[in-house]
Image (cartoon, rainbow, N blue to C red):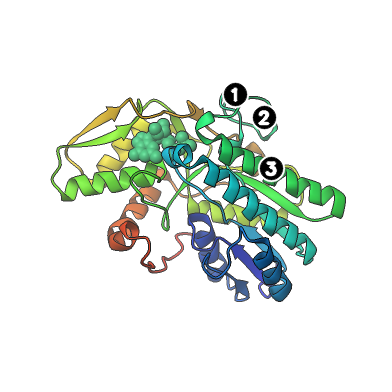
Amino acid sequence: MKISDKVYIAGHTGLVGSAILRLLKAKGYDNIVTRTSSELDLRNNLQVEEFFKAEKPDYVFLAAAKVGGIMANQTYPADFIFDNLTIQTNVIDNAYKSGVKKLLFLGSSCIYPKNAPQPILEDYLMTGFLEPTNAPYAIAKIAGINMCQSYNRQFGCKFISVMPTNLYGPGDNYHLQNAHVLPALIRKFHEAKINGLSSVTVWGTGKPRREFLHVDDAAMACYYLMQKYNDPEIVNIGSGMDHTIREMALLIKEITEFKGSLIFDETKPDGTPRKLLNVDKLRSLGWESVIELKEGLASTYKDFEENYFHYVHPSKRRVEVQVAHV
Ligand code: GDP
């Protein structure tokens, strides 16, 4: 992928897409194509077809998706399967038809079976039952992986798929009900501190283990793989380390300087007991994460505090944030 190539980032306002956009701009790419969802509804095949015919991008980062935390997945299962299937189907098929040189499809670590051995190897895909709380999302992503592989086989495309672990960082969704755990807790602890509350409620038992990766690290891994990786088999993107939700809540309590106590609401779902990716394949390809968790969370909290108004009123556009590491 050369600096002058035309690169389309699908989902450039989302957590991962915005990080890829920051990274490419920092590296000097100046032929980047983006569309907001109001300019181009990726669920509408006609619109997507016209867009690809008109723009003819060379490279595509497919980071557009309907995403959310455990509660959003449980509340809107139909939206999660429909939006993700249609978005990825339209983008992948039209990327093929318009002659895109290479496409990178972003999957998710929740494609793996609920009780997969840990850390999770790429080979464990389709070896067991999925975690029911996010099965519609996972099934859509599995279909996307297979679609990329099938287009490679039948049409000779170069479409690769990567599976990032739980991501966090600037540009995240901080919705109290629908967000993932880290942004939800950052907001809860921050608001509890500024409102002088005595406790913060953490969902579930606090015992599940999750792996977290800063989104700027994930963007760098995507960029690296776009340059170097050409195999149809999936690649995990993670930090290789996991923590309990209780540990994460205590770390965010420390970073936000909240002085009260934690309450665990065990009526809320825990989800899958552990989700730690095996990142040996990525390491053997020559890439490793660099942003340490505490440092990444501290800078994420700073960005959240500085842009608080925009994060709690997501309809208002927020300012662009700087890339942490290039
Ligand atoms: P998951 O990784 O797909 O399970 O998605 P989440 O990031 O939404 O949740 C991860 C874990 O954090 C689950 O065990 C949740 O119950 C727990 N958790 C604790 N507090 C919260 C919260 O305020 N929001 C969310 N989304 N999860 C929370």
The percent position of residue 220, horizontal first and vertical second, equals 57, 56
Query: According to the image, label 1 marks what residue?
Result: 117
Amino acid identity at mark 3: Ala
Helix, strand or loop at label 1? It is: loop
Amino acid identity at mark 1: Pro
Query: According to the image, label 3 marks what residue?
Result: 143
Q: Which residue is more in the foreground, 137 or 262?
A: 137
For residue 137, say whether it is visible.
yes
Label 2 neighbourhood size at 10 Å, few (<14), some (14-19), many (20+)? some
The percent position of residue 14, horizontal first and vertical second, equals 49, 58
Name the N-terminal-most of marks 2 and 3. Answer: 2
| Gap in angstroms between the C-alphas marked 1 and 2 | 8 Å
Eye-nearest disc, 2 or 3: 3
Residue positioned 30% across, 42% down in the render: 252
* Left or right of residue 274, residue 148 in this image: right
Question: Does any atom of ligand 1 lie closer than 8 Å to the CB of label 2?
Answer: no
Q: Quadrant of the N terminus?
A: bottom right
Residue positioned 50% across, 48% down in the render: 67
| Gap in angstroms between the C-alphas marked 3 and 1 | 22 Å
Q: Is residue 70 above or below residue 157?
A: above
Q: Is residue 321 above or below residue 168?
A: below
Query: According to the image, label 2 marks what residue?
Result: 124
| Gap in angstroms between the C-alphas marked 2 and 3 | 16 Å
Circles 1 and 2, Cβ within 8 Å, touching? The answer is: yes
For residue 284, say whether it is visible.
no
Task: Place residue 28 in its image quadrant.
Answer: bottom right
Residue positioned 61% across, 45% down in the render: 107
Residue positioned 60% across, 28% down in the render: 113
Q: Which residue is more in the foreground, 252 or 63?
A: 63
